[in-house]
Image: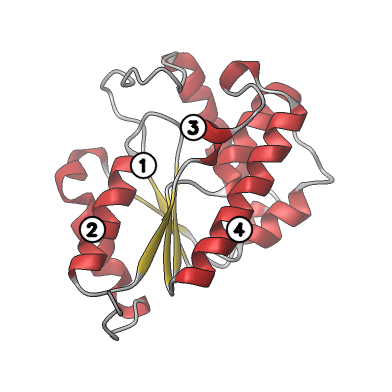
């Protein structure tokens, strides 16, 4: 099973991904976590991004997911390639030459969980943009892309979380994916 959390920056995807991994590991499942690759980019990110930077991020995301899938039967990604693509679209517009490839990769996710923007401030971490308008623009682009070709034909539909259920998100997701997760205990 490969699950990706999708959504704009600063909404709690990474925290939720760690919570999911913890719950699955406590249930004796072998799970790998793929965290935000953009933090390791040698190129500018956020509003200052470049085409080269975005291509690096897209390729690094896919490589990290491939590597994680080699190590464990369950993979949790704290974002998908589509999330990353939104930042490219925001600055440079849609790239038709990339979309068939990205649509194909989006079909490698068994479960897509949408994490909504929350009313709270974006936590300052010295990396991600704290601009709420930029955050909202990325969310709007994600929703727009999900409703257009080729992303509106993905085999896994997006299950959007409700902001008011934040305290139970991890438990709700684990319960929903239980049938997809192997019952074999991990070797850990």
Query: Residue at point 57% right, 22% down?
Result: 46
Q: Which residue was labeled with disc 2?
A: 22
Q: Earlier in the sequence, mark 1 or mark 2?
A: 1
Label number found at residue 147: none
Viewer-closest of 73 and 166: 73
From the image, tell me which residue sits under label 1.
Answer: 13
Question: Which quadrant of the figure contains the C terminus?
Answer: bottom left
Residue at far left of view: 167
Distance of mark 3 from mark 4, alpha carbons?
A: 17 Å
Q: Nearer the N terminus, badge 1 or badge 3?
A: 1
* Label 2 to label 4: alpha-carbon separation: 25 Å
| Number of the front mark, 3 or 4 | 4
Residue for point 51% across, 18% down = 134
Q: Position of residue 164 (x, y in %)?
A: 19, 39
Residue at the spot of label 3: 139
Foreground residue among 63 and 110:
63
Q: Mark 2 or 4, which is nearer the eye?
A: 2
User: How far apart are labels 1 and 3 at the CA level?
Assistant: 13 Å
Q: Position of residue 166 (x, y in %)?
A: 20, 42
Q: Earlier in the sequence, mark 3 or mark 4?
A: 4
Q: Eyeballing the image, is 127 above or below 59?
A: above
Task: Find numbered disc 2 in the image and state the secondary structure of the residue it sits on.
Answer: helix
Q: Residue at x 59, y 63 (%)?
A: 66
Report the residue marked by disc 4. Answer: 106
The tag earlier along the polypeptide, 3 or 2, is 2
Circle 2 packing at 10 Å, graded few (<14), some (14-19), many (20+), is some
Residues at marks 3 and 4 touching, judged by CB atoms closer than 8 Å: no
Q: Nearer the viewer, mark 1 or mark 3?
A: 1
In what element is the residue under mark 4?
A: helix
């Amino acid at each position: 099973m490969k699950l990706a959390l999708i959504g704009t920056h600063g909404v709690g995807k990474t925290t939720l991904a760690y919570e999911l991994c913890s719950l699955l590991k406590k249930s004796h499942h072998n799970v790998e976590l793929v965290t935000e690759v953009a933090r390791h980019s040698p190129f500018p990110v956020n509003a200052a991004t470049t085409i080269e930077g975005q291509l690096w991020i897209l390729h690094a995301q896919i490589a990290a997911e491939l590597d994680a899938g080699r190590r464990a039967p369950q993979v949790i990604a704290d974002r998908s390639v589509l999330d990353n693509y939104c930042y490219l679209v925001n600055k440079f517009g849609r790239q038709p030459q990339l979309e068939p490839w990205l649509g194909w990769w989006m079909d490698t996710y068994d479960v897509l969980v949408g994490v909504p923007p929350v009313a709270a401030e974006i936590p300052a971490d010295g990396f991600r943009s704290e601009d709420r308008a930029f955050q909202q623009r990325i969310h709007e682009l994600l929703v727009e892309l999900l409703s257009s070709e080729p992303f509106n034909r993905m085999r896994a539909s997006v299950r959007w979380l409700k902001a008011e259920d934040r305290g139970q998100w991890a438990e709700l997701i684990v319960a929903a994916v239980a049938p997809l997760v192997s019952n074999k205990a991990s070797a850990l």
